[in-house]
Amino acid sequence: MQFITTLLVACMFLSQVRGQETATVFGKVITTGGQPLPLANISLRGLPHGTTSDTTGYFSLDVPAGRDIILVVSSVGFITLEYPLRLAPGETREIHPEMKEGTRELEEVTVEAEIRRTGSFVPVSMKDYRLIPNASGQFETLLKTLPGVSSRDELSSRYSVRGGNFDENLVYVNGLEIYRPFLIRSGQQEGLSFINPDLVGSVKFSAGGFGAEYGDRMSSVLDITYRTPQKTGGSASLSFLGGSVHMEGLAAENKISWLAGIRYKTNRYLLQSLDVAGDYQPSFFDFQTYLQYQPSNRWEFSFLGNLSLNDYRFVPDDRETSFGTVNHAVKLYVLYDGQERDRFNTRTGALTAAYKPSSRLVLKFTASAFHTMEAETFDIRGSYSLNELDKEMGSKNLGDSILNIGIGSFLNHARNDLAGTIASAEHRGEYLAGGTTWKWGLKYQYEAVDNRVHEWEMVDSAGFSIPYNNKTVNLAYVSQGELNLRSGRLTSFLQYSRRFMTGAGNLSLNAGIRANYWDLTGEWFLSPRFSMVFEPLWEKEYRLHLSGGTYHQPPLFREYTNREGKSNLRIQAQRSVHIVGGADRYFTLWERPFVFSAEAYLKWMDRLIPYRIENVRIRYAGENLARGYATGLDLKMNGEFVPGTESWASLSLMRTREDIPGDSYTDETGGTVYPGYYPRPTDQLVNFGLHFQDYLPGDPSYRVQLTMMYGSRLPVNYPNTDRYDLYFRMPPYRRVDIGFIKVWVGEGTGKRFQGKFQGIRHFSVSAEVFNLLDINNTISYHWISTVNNLSGETRMYAVPNYLTSRRINIKLTVRF
């Protein structure tokens, strides 16, 4: 707190001193339709000065006084504007650039490469998403190739960032915090993520050290802004995995703009490649709209709505899985009976009123609600046989079963349901004062969750119930309980931003504080945060940055409940301190732009709730037991390896550990052992991502997209034990996807349809090969226990649950 206070006072003092040597240009970047244009680049020709407009189009930039300068305003897909200026010391000049759409679509990537980081955030290109081979069909696939981000499941949109889990990531769309269904346990059940890529205008992402205006999670922020249409248009796509349609346009003399999209997804084609054969019937539907109404220059109203209907049905038949080593090869064969039926339906709505009494002040008021109805129902019985395989080279029976080492059955039962509502009322404001930007916010959120859990598993091995007891028949696993949660949260923030010109270079400062009150426990949290970006004059190609702060994460739902279904409403917020520092190096290679980024970080955490990951379901301990840390280095190289296209490679090195103070166990000699720090479930030493684009020389309408991901071995805990220090590591994740695209009409072709189809501005056909190398990647394990003798001694086998194998997808895309 003392540090932040000192920093704020210093910033305000420096702003007065530097104001006598510089001038300020500020304003709002708009389109020809009068709509704000976020993430526009504002720079000075020949000087390393620059900034970007925020989500409302506003910007402020300190410029040299007493000399001729040229202010350059540019944005992807728009014609660049230039403003010759000469300002007196301390003068403030207001301008409102009106951007017109450009026509050279192939140059988008080149312009995008010049968009630089703002604080801890980096921009993400939507043009790359439209072409990337994508098995899940989700926008988040693009994030998984970025440094610090990892995911081991192509069926899921979930990702972890720098040692955090899926629940530690913030997602915003137009300033609204987004929630997803709570009960999903596997990628097979997961439907469409909230983000509709057809509606997205701009994207920025922070892997840590984000500012006070963002909420209370410990890992990352994905900030999405839906675009404002400039004319009537739309798009449609169709593939083996589903389809989508979107429309957009203007009405009422451009006072009303609208976006609407419908998506349908079925991953049945992919699921048929899993080891478990059966009748998969997934059906995922999504409708989303974004409406804006601007009756005057001072008032603007907007509505964001989403309806998501996700239904998953599965009737399993059988399973064959071979696993083990060369010296001990084993095969599991299972015959199933029963079925699974899951339903995850969500609704989201947000109404915002923005009042702009002047060009310097914006006041926003938002009312929003999220509602989810979820049900998970299954009764599945499996009869299994576990056999040892012939491993002798040259044998006629090589690979065949030669010895039965276990037979048995299991019965899985669940009747889980959840009804939840999250409603909020929020005010946010922004004020520009002579090159200084002040932001503030106040929000009240009410949560009501009713959850009933009733699931169990019975395991039989050779007629013995597991766990074996010669007096009773026991269930292998039971989770039963109810949670009826009613709580309110009050949050607020104040944030100061300023850009300074010094003799050594340009310095951008952002400092703020966030306050949070949670009525369930009566806790108050204060979270000071800051970021600095420095552009040295002696090395114009460098940009240095430092950010950090404290981050509190109160529980939302899953954290309350342990594996047995028991809830603990006395849980406290988990806490984390971030320190992030790095540098960006901008340079030219082969007369084309490139950027090399390096970032080091340290996160110290306490009051942690230990957890285990089962597929994509997180099973918490239900208590604040641990402390921990995450530290690492992220590297990224991106640029035009091929002229006119942007490719990148990222490498992340990371280690994350946690410790439960005072925990111990007794070893075989009777001694007490304190295990100390052990790997967290997301402890992944090496993560590598590659996204490469190319096209046929002389004909860019033929393109290829290659995505490669590698993640080193993650720790897996043994079942039926409370010891988190007992683990082994699953095999590394290795995946290569490739897409071949033919653009028949559109950018780079010089071709257009004639007649009644002349409105089509893009038509392409792509062939995508998922899991090109057909590698068996492991997502989780199915544990088989066998009884070896009449004394009841058992042996456990970890049978890997593999992800999807090689698949080919054909996709048609039309934009008009």
Image (cartoon, grey):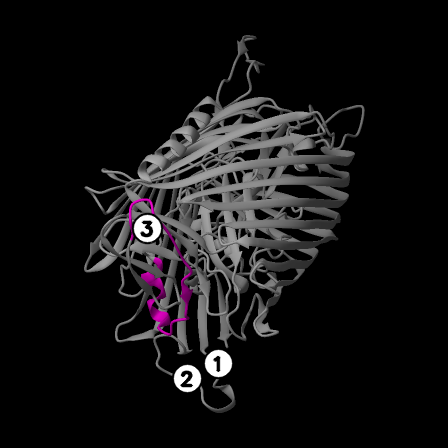
| Residue 300 visible at all | yes
**What percent of the width, then of the height, locates residue 738?**
40, 62
In this rendered view, identify the residue nearer to me: 13 or 554: 13
In the picture, residue 350 is in which quadrant?
bottom right
Disc 3 designates what residue?
50
Residue 665 sits above or below residue 224 on the image: above
Nearest the camera: 435 or 416? Answer: 435
Note whether 160 is above or below 115 in the view shown.
above
Task: Report the amino acid beneath label 2.
Answer: Arg
Q: Is residue 621 left or right of residue 84?
A: right
Q: Amino acid at mark 1?
A: Ile
User: Between disc 1 and disc 3, whose residue precedes?
Assistant: 3
* Callout 2: SS: loop
For discs 1 and 3, the disc positioned in front in the rendered view: 3
Which residue is found at the position 72% from the left and 37% from the top? 460
Q: Which residues are magenta?
A: 87-112
Residue displayed at 63% across by 26% down: 524
